[in-house]
Each structure stands twice: as structure tokens, then as C-alpha cells.
Amino acid sequence: MKQVIIIGCGTLGKTIIRGIIEKLGDFYKITAVCDALEEQAREMASFAHADIVTSADEIIAQKPDYVIEAASKKVVEDFAPSILQAGIDMIILSVGALADAALLKTIRQAGQTGNAKLYIASGAVGGFDLMRAVRFGGLAYAEIHTSKNPRSLNGAPYLNGAQLPPDEEICVFDGNAREAIQGFPQNVNVSVSTALATLGVDNTHVKISSIPGATCNTHEIHLGGEFGDIDIRVRVHPDKANPKSSTLAAWSILALLERLTQTIVI
Ligand SMILES: NC(=O)c1ccc[n+]([C@@H]2O[C@H](COP(=O)([O-])OP(=O)(O)OC[C@H]3O[C@@H](n4cnc5c(N)ncnc54)[C@H](O)[C@@H]3O)[C@@H](O)[C@H]2O)c1
């Protein structure tokens, strides 16, 4: 039985905790949870019959097999280096943190020192197997076009407090993954994970559209090069409780945890 600690008991953290207990209970035991909001932590600790931890040191002292992050970019920045250096594998959702080249370097070094891995969950998209494969086949172009209801995008720093039009489809952003995650930190972690698997944050093209009335988040990934071209289209409902989030991201953690238990790995 592998022991896991969950950081973040919000929208996705709750689905992950329930999923581990209900679907992966033969393989994993949640030993502790962590959340900056005491009430959230208490609620999920009680549900999971787990401890509450509040710092990287407390997490490391528990010696879990995996630490799962479903909290924020800041948690990746503050917790990942010491957890990896202590030899504990980590699985993250707030991938946007890795657009920072200095943090990426620190995390790589920490993982090498501790002989630990940082797993990036596929999150709200997929197709990373194809992305990784075509890098060996002359990948020359990578783009991700994300389309969401304006209510999922409103409030992003890039918009400087402006509200997106409620009745007009518009392209809100056109740039690279580094700029996209700065402007839309809650919405486009997927642009950074796509970039990390393809041409990097400076060379991966990102478009973001606002579609009034849209009931699904759509991510269209285009890959091109000597090998030919690939289009991946993901169209899924946003999380009911938090339209800025995607339940698919929580399922991707459960799928990765399941994969880590398997003998025949697909
Ligand atoms: N990779 C992807 O495709 C993908 C998809 C959706 C969401 N995400 C990311 O996953 C993360 C979680 O998303 P969510 O929808 O569950 O968010 P949420 O806001 O519903 O929940 C986040 C929880 O983490 C806690 N938290 C935040 N900062 C913390 C800190 N420093 N220490 C301890 N706890 C802290 C909050 O109190 C909150 O309870 C976000 O960073 C989000 O951007 C990634």
C-alpha cells in the first residue's frame, strides 16, 4: 500500500481524495492533507481519516510515497524542491509554475539529488504520448487554442479588470505559452504542459478565445512537422463548482496513480 499526501483540498483536491478512497483504496492510503484554509483541510482530513500537515517539513517527516499537488503555483515553488530533494516523488497540476526557467532548473537538480521524480499530470488535456513521440520525428510547430465561456476567463490578470463581451466571440490572447500563463494563471496550465512536452514555453503558440454561451472548455492542439500533422481536440464540461477548473484534471491524477500501480503499462 503506497502512502500519499494531498496538498490542496479545493475543487480538484476533493475529487482526487474521493477518487483515491473510492476507486484506488487497494493501492493507496491518504495519510495526510494540507490546505491553507483550515476548514477545507479539516473537512477532508476527517473524510479521509488522515492527518493535517502545514509545511514541507511535516510532509517530509511523514515519508509518503507520493505528494500530490492540487493547490497553486506557489505550492509548486515553495514545496517541490525540498520534497524532491528528500527523495519523495511529487505529482503536480499547477504546471504553470514550470514556465519559470529558474524554478525548472532548481526542481531538476532537487530531483537528481534526491533521486525523485516530478510527474506532470495530463490535467485538462491529453495526447502527451503523441507530443513526446513526434519530437523524434521533426516536430516544428506546436499550438494550443483554448476556448472558454467568458465567465471562466473574466478576472484574469491579462484583462486588467475588463469584462469580456457577453454576446460576442473574440480571440482574447495570441502569443506564446510563457505569456499565456502570466496573463491567465488559472486557465492555461495546459499551455505550459503542452509546451514542456513539445517546443518549450517560448516557442509554443497559444490562442485563447472567449465564447459566450459555451458549455464546454475546448482545447485544440495542433502539431506539425516532417512527420505530418496531428490535431487533438478536447471538449469537456468545466467543473460544476468552479468554472475556472476542469474535473478532467482530477481524473488525470487518478489515472496516473492507477498507471503507477500497473504491471502492463499503457
Ligand atoms: N494542469 C491542468 O490542466 C489544470 C487544470 C485545472 C486546474 N489546475 C490547477 O490546479 C490547481 C487546483 O485547482 P482547483 O480548481 O482545485 O483550485 P481551488 O481554488 O478550487 O483549490 C485550491 C486549494 O488549494 C489551497 N491552496 C492554495 N494555495 C495554497 C498554499 N500555498 N498552501 C496550501 N494550500 C493552498 C486553497 O486554499 C484551495 O483550497 C490550481 O493551481 C489550478 O490552476 C491545473
Image (cartoon, rainbow, N blue to C red):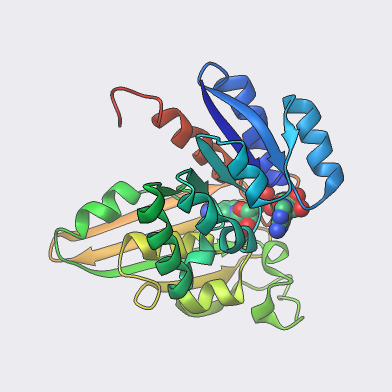
Q: Residue at x 57, y 76 (%)?
A: 182
Where residue 71 sits in the image (x, y, percent)? Answer: 66, 53
The vertical placement of 203 against 251, above or below, is below
Q: Is residue 211 above or below residue 29?
A: below
The relative height of residue 201 versus residue 78 in the rendered view (above or below) is: below
Left or right: where 88 falls relative to 60: left
Front residue (pair 45, 229): 45
Q: Give x and y (percent) for residue 72.
A: 64, 58
Query: Is 119 situated left or right of 45 in this image?
Result: left
The answer to whether residue 113 is visible is: yes
Left or right of 29, for residue 226:
left
- Residue in the picture at 63% in, 40% down: 6
Q: Residue at x 55, y 63 (%)?
A: 147
Q: Position of residue 59 (x, y in %)?
A: 63, 43
Tell me where residue 265 appears, x and y as whole percent: 30, 29
Query: Where's the C terminus, which quadrant?
Result: top left
Quarter residue 111 falls in: bottom left
Q: Nearer the viewer, residue 200 or 145?
A: 200
Of all residues, the one furthest to the top in this rendering is: 26
Drawn side of residue 246 relative to residue 255, left or right: right
Does any portion of residue 242 appear in the rendered image?
Answer: no
